[in-house]
Image (spheres, rainbow, N blue to C red):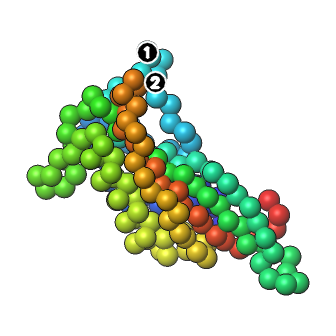
Amino acid sequence: MAEPLISVVDLLRNRMTDPNSSNRIGDNWIYPDWPRTEDGDGELSTNSFPRISCVYVDERGRPYAVGSSALLISSQIQIDVWCSTKQEPLNVGGADKKKEQALADYLARQVVKEIDDHWHDDISHFERIELISKFPIDPDIENGIFRHTLIYQFEYKSTSVE
């Protein structure tokens, strides 16, 4: 079984459409870590945005059942959508274009939709998935970042202590 974080990243990479794919160098925009906000020259280009990061917040286990050596593992994963203040509006479907916080909010809703619609197919080893929290973060004007945060809890059965 894949690690919960990698399972979530893989689901999002396979299901989400990058609204900046025509301008991005490379095809990766969803990362299993906290994204860097600058490259070797001091900052990331606007073509590096939007970005989605997935990181562990907490993980704990409890006995799965009385007399069982298996554990029910609960992993909390934080998913952040990052958008640049310097980016032109991006096409998100049809003639609809979004930028800044509206783009971050839209992509956060898409993350929820893709997880809700596809977790049974793509990451079916989870017994339960719950969206704990979803909220925009105040803009980071100094670094030119708009962000939307989601926190999910994923539960799965583990037959060994990892």
Tag 2 near tag 1, CB within 8 Å: yes
Indicate the quadrant containing the N terminus: top left, top right, bottom left or bottom right. Answer: bottom right
Three-letter amino acid code of the residue under disc 1: Asp
Three-letter amino acid code of the residue under disc 2: Glu
How far across and how far down the image is residue 129, in percent? 55, 70
Residue 33 versus residue 63: which sits nearer the camera?
63
Q: What residue is drawn where x is 49% and y is 51%?
A: 79
Residue extending furthest toward the right = 67
Determine the secondary structure under disc 2: loop
Residue 2 versus residue 34: which sits nearer the camera?
34
Q: What residue is drawn where x is 30% and y is 53%?
A: 106
Residue bearing the label numbered 2: 38
Residue 90 versus residue 132: which sits nearer the camera?
132
Determine the secondary structure under disc 1: loop
How far across and how far down the image is residue 155, in percent? 64, 70
Give above or below for 110 relative to 156.
above
How many residues crowd mark 1 within 10 Å: few (<14), some (14–19), many (20+)?
few
Residue extending furthest toward the left = 95
Indicate the quadrant containing the C terminus: top left, top right, bottom left or bottom right. Answer: bottom right
How far across and how far down the image is residue 50, in percent? 35, 40
